[in-house]
Amino acid sequence: MIDLSQLKFSKTHEWFSLDADLGTIGITQHAQEEISDVVFVELPKVGKNVAQGEEIAVVESVKAAFSIYAPVSGTMTEVNEALAKDPGLINRSPYEQGWIVRMKLKSPAEAESLMDQKQYDEWVSGGSH
Amino acid sequence: MSSDVASPSETSLKKTSLYPLHAELGARFCSFAGWALPIYYTSILKEHEAVRTQAGLFDLSHLGHLELSGPDAAAQLQLLVTQDLVSLEPGQAIYTPMLNSRGWIMDEMIFYHLPLTQPSPQRGEGKGEGQCFRLVVNAANGDKILSWLKARLRGGTSVQDLREKVGTLALQGPRAAEVLAKLSSLKLERLPRYHVTAGTVAGKEGWIARTGYTGEDGCEIFAAVEDLAPIWRALLEAGEPMGIQPAGLGARDTLRLEAGLPLGGADLDEKTTPLEANLDWTVEWRKGPFMGREALERQKREGITRRLAGFEMKGQGIPRAGYGIFQGENRIGQVTSGGAVPLTQPSPQRGEGKDERVRAIGMGYVTPQAAKPGTRITIEIHNRKVDAEIVKLPFYRRKKS
């Protein structure tokens, strides 16, 4: 099981885990419950450079299309190819098999601006999302 | 994560009498035509599948009921719709557009010719005189249709606004009849499609109609607003062994899309004629004059410039309303409805490397030449042009039992 206390979270409901200068990004349990039934994920190209806050992927549920934003700046190193045939992984396993992209960070210090699990839970239950 | 779907600020929205029951069932709500309505309870895909294979129950309290009665109501209403109401027998129902003088669709609705020989629950004040039609209109259009009718009906035809008094539940799916039989003396098999009869469900009086908007068998139940909650509870309980699921607007939308049924406000609007919207079959030319007839006759002579067509995605992506439809670099139309529906049978149009549970389909207006099945088109999805193919509507047709 993944340890949620080791993750960082954005106000736009992405989670982010950091291993040296490599980050993994997905959407939170709360987000997958909100969007329900993921049926397609539009993934970026490996090698693409993105700035913090830029759109990196689009998660399509039966309900609507949802943009996913880069929690930090960097370069795409890997995308989750398993999502092509089984995008429902995002619903079933949002923090593990349903990860979306991996990226090399430009400036690891940017991750400091993100929330920890406790702050994120408060943010969500505050209803101000 | 962000999206164009806003969470409803539920305080400013009207709530149906079943709102607390939906909340209890864990519903997620959306805002639709001024109402807070359940979009889904568990999952749109699961609820869609329940209706196709078992049974689903929908709260349609947002639909507006109007009642029109008078000694010559049929002849009066005949002037305002495209279908033939005069030959509609008591107990029969019919789907019809209502046009303005330019031939454009103001709204489309079902007219139920209520059989007055039966005891008639929830009737308006004009009881017992001549013919009586129940009209079920789209939520957003209630006021517009009410004033349109009041301004035009003559000959003592009265219009009753039952929107605050009567609501609709839809029980849909191959096992709907079985569920209903546990709570009603009515055998749905004995009520032909597009017929209505007075009846009781769970001891509450109402009208039961063998109609729906899912492409599946089933019925719609019209009952007094205060009786809806007990009927809802009883149906969910009685239907449990048959796999009944409460179903939200999300599944209602994907079901009607798959059944090729146009949605007012999306696929139909006040700039569209029935001939453009594939609703030629609803225009009864053999009857006399009706509002919009001259405009339709002109369009029939001159030919239409666009037609509603169905398409299936071959490439990856989900089509949504508003996306452009292209042939090469030429924009030939626009998507009016789209989404992903469960894949129940192999589809030759569907490409490789995609979610194995669903297929992506849509409807939109294209040039009449392009509207032919087999035409290759592309849909512009997030700045990419994705391959799709025009297919024959409906996408899904129920197997006759």
Image: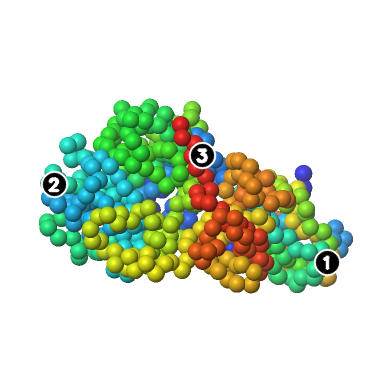
Mark 1 falls within which chain?
A
* Foreground pick, A8 / B28: B28
Q: Is residue B385 left or right of residue B115?
A: right
Task: Name the residue tied to disc 1.
Answer: A47
Q: Is residue B217 left or right of residue B50?
A: left
| Rendered view: B47 above or below B64 | above
Q: Secondary structure at mark 3?
A: helix
**Labels 3 and 1 within one chain:** no
Amino acid at the residue labelled 2:
Gly
Q: How many marks?
A: 3
Q: Residue at x 56, y 61 (%)?
A: B320
Q: Residue A6 location, x and y as percent?
A: 78, 54
Mark drawn on residue B52: 3
Amino acid at the residue labelled 1:
Gly
Q: How is the image coloured?
A: rainbow
Task: Name the residue tied to disc 2.
Answer: B130
Question: Residue farthest to the right?
Answer: A20
Specify few, some or many for label 2: CA neighbours under 10 Å numbering under 14, 14-19, or 20 or more.
Answer: some
Q: Secondary structure at mark 1?
A: loop
User: Which one is closest to the eye, mark 1 or mark 2?
Assistant: 2
Q: Is residue B387 left or right of residue B72?
A: right
Q: Residue B66 location, x and y as percent?
A: 26, 53
Q: Residue B2 location, x and y as percent?
A: 61, 63
Amino acid at the residue labelled 3:
Arg
